[in-house]
């Protein structure tokens, strides 16, 4: 674990930027021994030298270069948000204070924030009070239902989360120099990815990285996108949105998927070909939720006529499979998911006279995201698996 002492991390960047202890101490307005002590402590925590010491000055090692990149990104998030609240906070705010502020923003309550941080309530209250004193302004509006952050405070909270994420990424990068697998990869999985693309990729990843922790988060697209933009999720795998919903994300297409109409093995339409929309509309359906690309294509398929009656909206392939297997319902699902279920002889694809347009499946990540080595390995394996599925 690297230090979460913001002052020490800033001193490290000052030495990396100037190449001299004396210049760094002047820039940071501290003594040279204080700079030396901070660098030595940081090197012990990082497991090796961050600088090559020469007569010409201090030059970052590969280990130091990895840390420099992450810290600069972290402070690029943090410093503008601190300055927007008050220029003094860049010099005075501590890691503990920022953790307290973020917890209060997210819980809107000091007591709940203290419980989340496993601290005493007066400790969190004191941290907020000191921040407000340094800022010379109130950071929260005290309401009867809780504490409401100001616009600048809410923006600072978002920056804190992204900066802390970079600190975590720094630890993962530094662990690579010791051959260790540190940290956790968080993948947001949309329906198609859960049943086809992601499982094979994770199996291949585990053989390469046997100890790397991976968390797969299921959820609705909007929830996953919020987590992605906050830094809680590293990458989303699944159907892309056209156009992209917001400009601070990147959508990387991997292949086009085509929807399929499915039914239970004993459905009356099994074995029939070239079925018309009118015939299909006579049956009840299980379809994806409104707002998803798949549901949009389903609605467009029946454009110009009334949608079928008795629609059940569900995002779970397991629920869809059980319903159509026990009734005359038809299902609308990703072609890739249908292949996986059909191969197990659990469902049957219905022959429709019209073809579905393709919809892009791929990766979604933050525009300014720089993956760790482990994350890059997993992304490459997902790309390879997607290439296999699209053949």
Image (cartoon, helix red, strand yellow):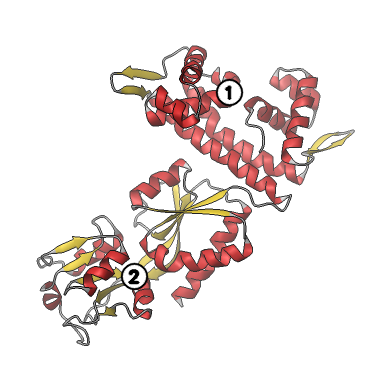
In the image, 374 versus 206, the foreground residue is 206
Give residue 124's mark.
none
* Relative image position of residue 247 (x, y in whole percent): 41, 46
In the image, 103 versus 20, the foreground residue is 103
The structure residue drawn at horizontal position 25% and vertical position 57%, both measured from the top left corner, is: 289
The residue under label 1 is 94
For label 2, the SS is: loop
- Nearer the camera: disc 2 or disc 1: 1
The structure residue drawn at horizontal position 34% and vertical position 57%, both measured from the top left corner, is: 242
Q: Quadrant of residue 324?
A: bottom left
The answer to whether 336 appears left or right of 363 in the picture is left
* Relative image position of residue 133 (x, y in whole percent): 49, 12
State the residue lying farthest toward the right.
55
* Relative image position of residue 11 (x, y in whole percent): 70, 27
Q: Is 121 located above or below residue 236 in the figure?
A: above
The structure residue drawn at horizontal position 68% and vertical position 39%, both measured from the top left corner, is: 68
In the image, 115 versus 221, the foreground residue is 115
* Relative image position of residue 9 (x, y in whole percent): 67, 30
The answer to whether 273 appears left or right of 188 in the picture is left
Residue 212 seen in the current view: yes
Residue contact between numbered discs 2 and 1, judged by CB atoms under 8 Å: no
Q: Is 275 located above or below residue 139 in the figure?
A: below
The residue under label 2 is 358
Q: CA distance from mark 2 to mark 1?
A: 51 Å
Q: For the residue carrying disc 1, how many other residues have a C-alpha within 10 Å: few (<14), some (14-19), or many (20+)?
A: some
Sequence order check, earlier mark of 2 and 1: 1
The structure residue drawn at horizontal position 57% and vertical position 63%, both measured from the top left corner, is: 205
């Amino acid at each position: 674990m690297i230090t979460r002492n913001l002052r020490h991390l800033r001193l490290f960047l000052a030495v990396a930027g100037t190449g001299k202890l004396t210049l760094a101490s002047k820039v940071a307005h501290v003594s040279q021994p204080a700079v030396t002590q901070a660098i030595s402590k940081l090197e012990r925590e990082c497991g090796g030298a961050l600088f090559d010491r020469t007569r010409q000055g201090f030059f970052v090692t590969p280990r130091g270069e990895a840390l420099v990149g992450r810290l600069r990104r972290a402070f690029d998030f943090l410093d503008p948000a601190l300055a927007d609240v008050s220029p003094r906070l860049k010099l005075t705010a501590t890691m503990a204070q920022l953790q307290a502020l973020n917890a209060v923003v997210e819980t809107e309550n000091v007591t709940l924030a203290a419980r989340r941080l496993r601290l005493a309530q007066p400790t969190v209250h004191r941290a907020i009070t000191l921040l407000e004193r340094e800022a010379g302004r109130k950071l929260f509006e005290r309401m009867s239902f809780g504490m409401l952050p100001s616009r600048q405070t809410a923006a600072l909270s978002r920056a804190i989360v992204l900066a802390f994420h970079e600190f975590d990424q720094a630890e993962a990068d530094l662990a690579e120099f010791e051959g260790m697998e540190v940290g956790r990869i968080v993948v947001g999985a949309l329906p198609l990815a859960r049943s086809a693309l992601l499982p094979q990729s994770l199996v291949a990843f585990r053989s390469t990285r046997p100890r790397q922790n991976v968390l797969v988060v299921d959820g609705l697209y909007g929830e996953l996108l919020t987590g992605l933009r906050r830094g809680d999720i590293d990458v989303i795998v699944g159907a892309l949105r056209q156009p992209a919903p917001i400009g601070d994300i990147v959508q990387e297409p991997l292949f086009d998927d085509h929807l399929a109409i499915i039914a239970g093995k004993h459905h009356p339409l099994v074995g029939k070909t070239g079925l018309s929309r009118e015939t299909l509309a006579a049956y009840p359906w299980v379809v994806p939720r409104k707002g998803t690309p798949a549901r949009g294509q389903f609605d467009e398929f029946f454009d110009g006529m009334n949608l079928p009656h008795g629609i059940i909206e569900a995002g779970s392939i397991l629920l869809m499979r059980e319903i159509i297997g026990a009734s005359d319902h038809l299902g609308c699902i990703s072609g890739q998911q249908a292949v996986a279920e059909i191969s197990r002889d659990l469902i049957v694809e219905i022959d429709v006279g019209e073809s579905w347009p393709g919809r892009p499946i791929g990766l979604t990540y933050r525009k300014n995201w720089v993956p760790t080595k482990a994350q890059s390995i997993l992304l490459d394996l997902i790309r390879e698996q997607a290439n296999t599925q699209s053949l």
